[in-house]
Amino acid sequence: MRQPDSQARAFRGRGTMRRVRVRPLLALAAAAVIAGSAAPASASITFTSASFYIPLNISALGTFDSGSYHTISGPGVGPAFYMQQVGELRRVSEQLDVSLNTDLKPEMDNEIFCTDQDGHEVGRASAGTNYVVTPGGHEIWQLSMLIRADEPGNYTCGIQVQTDTGHGDHYQMTVWPVEDGDTSSGTWLQVSSADQVDAAEWRVYPLDSCPTADPALKCSYIGGPGSGAPATADLFGTPPDGRWTADNDATTIDATGTIQLTSCPPGTGSCPPNRQGNAAYAVVDSYLDVDQLNPDGSVCKVNRDYGWALGQSASEFVITTDVHHQPLSYHVSAPVSQNCGGSRVFQADLHYQWVAGDPVKIENGNVNVINSVRATTTTVPPVLGGTEAQADAAIQAAQLTVAPTYVMSPAAPGSVLSENSPDGTVEPTGSSVQITVSLGQASVPNVLSFDQQSAEQAITNAGLSVGTVSYNSNCTDPGDVLTQNPSAGVQVPAGTSVNIQVSTCPSGGGGSGGTGGGGNGSGNPHHQP
């Protein structure tokens, strides 16, 4: 078992006795939970990252000393799951839903942990401490982490919970179950049912490296007048930190995490004096980005979640002095775009912006990401230089879909100029391949003062089409072109329509080839009076 972090050690060191009443949890039957969205219809095999709920047994709780942790499920209490090989990864997630019948604003702590069959701990995560503000109100925290098998065998996971006020008063804590299958509330523990191949996790700090009092300023701080701390912080946002590549067969990725923030009001023992403010609150703006990148490292597709905290679900979070500690949770589920130049690289960035009030300390926490929806793969065929029809046939034969766009180009009309993803890229079947098709390019000829027949011939010879022909009965050079649209010299796609207006006389009507004393039918715009 790991040693508790410094904040948890101080928390556990208070020896006041507390009486706790725990309401029985409704056991959650093991059930598959499907993440992500449906795969394209053309995929022959598609599967998702599934998970199961561990039936919770909290009979081991009851009355306990406030200075120690108590386990909901876990070794010797909850059921085991089998991991087949060394290095196998599982995602473990939980939600803790509690209430207390006191207005003393007691601290709550919530952790998940897992052990192997020999009792060795293989993973632990904490939401940190939080102050319960409303007597009887539900306090909900969520956590998620990756665990790695150190040997084949059975593994067990559990939730640990503690409450303490630092006072001598007795009070009761209730752990709430899931009701009617609605997991938005209630307490649950969930484990992925298969190896999360190539999943990744980033931690804010190694365990114990951000101490409670932090006299050496090892922790990160943002904002606060006169504190000397920067206004913003970006965790994992500097490559190679936060870089991760989705597998070739992934159609959807799923990222989740929880980070503990602590405000620094005057006199707090959680922050050093030179990082303390003089307000009774702090305001922080926050979001988690897990953005897909182009091959050159620029952002191709932004995937963002602004996070949530108890009673708050906007990008701007208020941390009161009563609460003081505030876990923020994030969840980003996003499709893997096939149209980022063949790149499947993602960049995580957990952004914090101090807005007002006291300085804020960024404490422990983590973000993890998995390939959540997968499909069988195929290879993008080479289609550059061929015709659109040839490209359509080759892409569809590879069990991919075609998404054409059309651009003006000197290349022959209908020829394929580019494809995204590039040929040779391995993609899930059913993925979209964007092709860029040439519309050709032509220069609009000058047909002003041409007779109608000559003007139309010149337009056709330039690879364009004759559009609307209108007539103006002004009797100026009858039969000749007065205006054209587009104008002469403009570069347009091949086949573009050119509209012309022809002069007529009321008595003679419209004409061409010299009608009404107009042109001579040779295409010469010059006319004798």
Image (cartoon, rainbow, N blue to C red):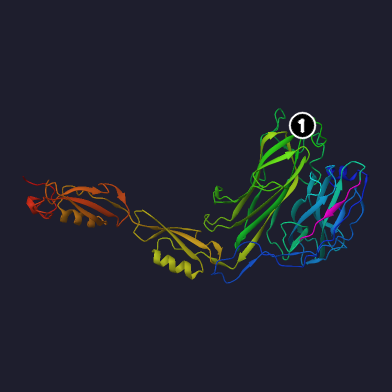
Residue 151 falls in which quadrant of the image?
Answer: bottom right
x%, y% of residue 513? 11, 55
Looking at this view, name the residue that lies furthest to the bottom.
Answer: 44
Residue holding disc 1: 276
Within 10 Å of disc 1 (Cα), the crowding (few <14, some 14-19, many 20+) is many
| 497 lies above or below 381 | above
x%, y% of residue 396? 47, 68
Viewer-closest of 395 and 30: 30
Does 176 appear in magenta?
yes
Viewer-closest of 504 and 250: 504
- The reply, left or right, for residue 318 in relation to residue 27 is left
Q: What residue type is labelled 1?
A: Gln
Looking at this view, name the residue that lies furthest to the left.
Answer: 529
x%, y% of residue 477? 11, 47
Asked which secondary structure carries label 1, the reply is loop
Does 74 appear in magenta?
no
Residue 423 visible: no
- The reply, left or right, for residue 230 in relation to residue 214 is left
Viewer-closest of 147 and 297: 147
The residue sitting at 23% across, 49% down in the picture is 484
The residue sitting at 45% across, 68% down in the picture is 394
Please tell me whether the stretch drawn in magenta is mainly helix, strand or loop. Answer: loop
Span shown in magenta = 170-178
